[in-house]
Image (cartoon, rainbow, N blue to C red):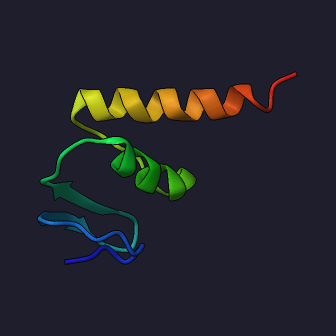
């Protein structure tokens, strides 16, 4: 299956799909490629769990933000 954003996902459960929110539960291995693919979606995505992936996403975006702070 694939999300509308073009990310190919091995397994997903659609939890919420309405005009305000699209929420899925993904079954995947957390690695740098997943972090990069999710980060590519920018503010259009919010990782809710697991905590490890939330932390990695936060660290990725904080590192990017630091490059633009003078």
Rendering quarter of residue 6 = bottom left
- Height in image: 63 above or below 15? above
Q: Where is residue 56 in the image (x, y as percent from the top left)?
A: 39, 30
- Residue 35 in percent (x, y) is at 40, 45
Q: What residue is rendered at 55% in x and 53% in y?
A: 42
Which residue is at a point 18% across and 46% down the rendered structure image?
29
Please report the residue visible at 28 percent of the width from the left and 71 percent of the height from the top. 8
Q: Which residue sits furthest top?
A: 70
Quadrant location of residue 37?
A: bottom left
Seen in the picture, residue 17 relative to 57 is either above or below; the reply is: below
Total tally of numbered discs in the picture: 0
- The residue closer to the viewer here, 15 or 31, is 31
Q: Which image quadrant: the C terminus?
A: top right
Q: Position of residue 25 (x, y in %)?
A: 17, 55
Image quadrant holding the N terminus, namely: bottom left
Name the outermost residue toward the front.
32
Nearer to the camera, 16 or 9: 9
Q: Please name the residue shown 34% across and 43% down the image.
A: 47
Q: Where is residue 41 in the image (x, y as percent from the top left)?
A: 51, 59
């Amino acid at each position: 299956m694939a999300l509308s954003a073009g990310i190919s996902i091995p397994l997903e459960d659609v939890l919420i799909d309405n005009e305000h929110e699209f929420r899925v539960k993904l079954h995947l291995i957390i690695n740098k490629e997943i972090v990069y693919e999710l980060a590519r979606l920018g503010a259009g995505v919010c990782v809710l769990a697991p905590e490890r992936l939330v932390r990695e996403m936060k660290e990725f975006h904080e590192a990017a933000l630091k490059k633009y702070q003078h």
